[in-house]
Image (cartoon, rainbow, N blue to C red):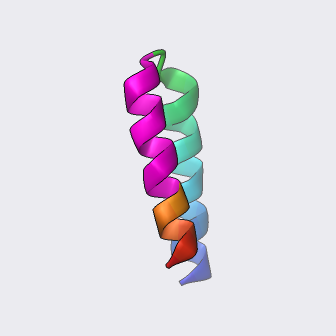
Amino acid sequence: MIIMMQICRSILIKMLIKSKNTILRGTIYIHFLFMALR
């Protein structure tokens, strides 16, 4: 469970770094917050 969250976190961080689109960045950030709250 913890390992899965770490993998998802690393993928999201890579996507955030690659993405220059602020809308996509915002949706990924919101999704990450939602996952963290679960």
Splitting the image into 4 quarters, where does residue 24 fall? top left
The answer to whether one can see residue 8 in this image is: no
Question: Can you name the residue that lies furthest to the bottom here?
Answer: 1
**Percent coordinates x, y for residue 36 in the rendering:** 57, 69
**Which is more toward the observer, 12 or 22?**
22
The answer to whether one can see residue 19 in this image is: yes
Question: Can you name the residue that lies furthest to the top here?
Answer: 20
**Percent coordinates x, y for residue 6 in the rendering:** 61, 65
Range of magenta residues: 21-32
The residue under the point 48% across, 67% down is 35
**Which is more toward the observer, 3 or 37?**
37
Disc tally is 0
The residue under the point 55% across, 73% down is 37
Q: Is residue 6 above or below residue 38?
A: above
The residue under the point 47% across, 64% down is 34
Left of 27 or right of it: where is 29? right
**What is the chief secondary structure element of the magenta stretch?**
helix
- Residue 31 part of the magenta-drawn span: yes
